[in-house]
Image (cartoon, rainbow, N blue to C red):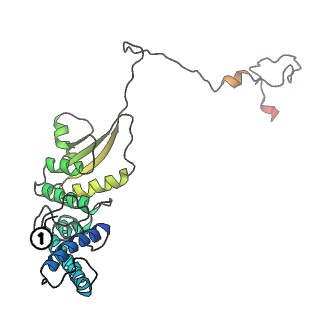
């Protein structure tokens, strides 16, 4: 790979000098430098491969020069704002964007975090406008969603809102029919709140809502709706009908075999 040129196949761009990819880059670069150093020797040095003492010494020098050269290349990449490594990008710009260093509690590799910070900086400098809020939510959600401003909903006659809601907006996330929300939905929701708090106007409040939809599959081949009705009747006093509440069956205090209702009698002396 040419020197001071971004390798399109490179994966790891962090500042740590370790890992399989880094070691492979050192070996490849050291071999190029080693060959160059051998070509600088006088003709009486005939060894073309590592083995003799002077070739071993040149190999050590080549390895150290390769490490220095790779480090200089990485520093050179930091000059370009779009290629700055994530560690430096966060320390320079990301820390200023996030209040007190509160970053979304999601898992990012180095390249993903770099792209995330660059996108957030672009959104931040768009200003506190509805488009910025939509772009911020779009960083975490791949499905359908909408950002609605409450004062516009009031103008459209939406009920349930009044003047106290005029400085608020809603983020409505639509869950596809037959699919649930992502497994890490609570982490994503926390990340959305963190980022939206960065770009929203300071005097506004917002709410995140999740909307679930179901697919309707009509009955029959022509799509007609077949309906039916069922109902159940229950009465708590049904068991009372099965019980005898008029005393002992076929016996009463007057000696009758069949009970009968008596009215107008004075029972004040019975107690």
Residue at 22% across, 74% down: 30
Residue at 21% across, 52% down: 136
Residue at 81% across, 32% down: 269
Counting from the top left corner in percent of width and height, residue 220 is at 42, 14
Q: Nearer the viewer, residue 164 or 217?
A: 217
Residue 120 in the image: above or below residue 135: below
Counting from the top left corner in percent of width and height, residue 246 is at 77, 23
Counting from the top left corner in percent of width and height, residue 268 is at 77, 31
Residue 110 in the image: above or below residue 58: above
Seen in the image, is 249 located left or right of residue 205?
right
Seen in the image, is 69 located left or right of residue 265?
left
Counting from the top left corner in percent of width and height, residue 159 is at 25, 35
Residue 204 in the image: above or below residue 242: below
Q: Nearer the viewer, residue 209 or 164?
A: 209
Picture quarter containing residue 35? bottom left
Picture quarter containing residue 148? top left
Q: Which residue is mark 1?
A: 76
Packing grade of label 1 (10 A; few <14, some 14-19, many >=20) is some
Res. 181 visible in picture: yes
Instruction: Give the quadrant of the C terminus.
Output: top right
Seen in the image, is 263 located left or right of residue 61?
right
Seen in the image, is 71 located left or right of residue 174?
left
Number of marks: 1
Residue 212 in the image: above or below residue 106: above
Picture quarter containing residue 144? top left
Q: Secondary structure at mark 1?
A: helix
Instruction: Give the quadrant of the N terminus.
Output: bottom left
């Amino acid at each position: 790979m040419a020197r001071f040129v971004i390798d399109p196949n490179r994966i790891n761009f962090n500042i740590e000098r370790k890992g399989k990819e880094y070691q492979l880059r050192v070996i490849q670069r050291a071999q190029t430098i080693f060959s160059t150093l051998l070509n600088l020797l006088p003709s009486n040095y005939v060894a073309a491969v590592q083995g003799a003492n002077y070739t071993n010494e040149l190999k050590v020098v080549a390895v150290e020069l390769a490490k220095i050269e790779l480090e200089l290349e990485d520093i050179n990449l930091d000059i370009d704002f779009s290629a700055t490594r994530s560690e430096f990008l966060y320390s320079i710009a990301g820390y200023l964007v996030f209040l007190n260093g509160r970053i979304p509690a999601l898992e990012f590799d180095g390249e993903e975090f770099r792209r995330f910070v660059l996108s957030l900086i672009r959104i931040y400098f768009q200003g506190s406008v509805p488009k910025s809020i939509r772009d911020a939510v779009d960083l975490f959600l791949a499905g359908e969603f909408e950002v609605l401003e409450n004062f516009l909903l009031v103008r459209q006659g939406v009920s349930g809102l009044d003047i106290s809601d005029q400085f608020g907006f809603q983020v409505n996330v639509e869950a596809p029919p037959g699919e649930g929300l992502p497994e890490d939905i609570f982490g994503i929701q926390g990340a959305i709140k963190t980022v939206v708090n960065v770009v929203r106007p300071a005097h506004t409040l917002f709410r995140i809502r999740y909307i679930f939809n179901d697919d309707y599959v009509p009955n029959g081949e022509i799509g007609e709706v077949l309906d039916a009705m069922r109902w159940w009747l229950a009465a708590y006093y049904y068991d009372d009908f099965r019980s005898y509440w008029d005393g002992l069956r076929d016996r009463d205090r007057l000696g009758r075999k069949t009970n009968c209702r008596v009215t107008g009698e004075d029972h004040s002396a019975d107690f």
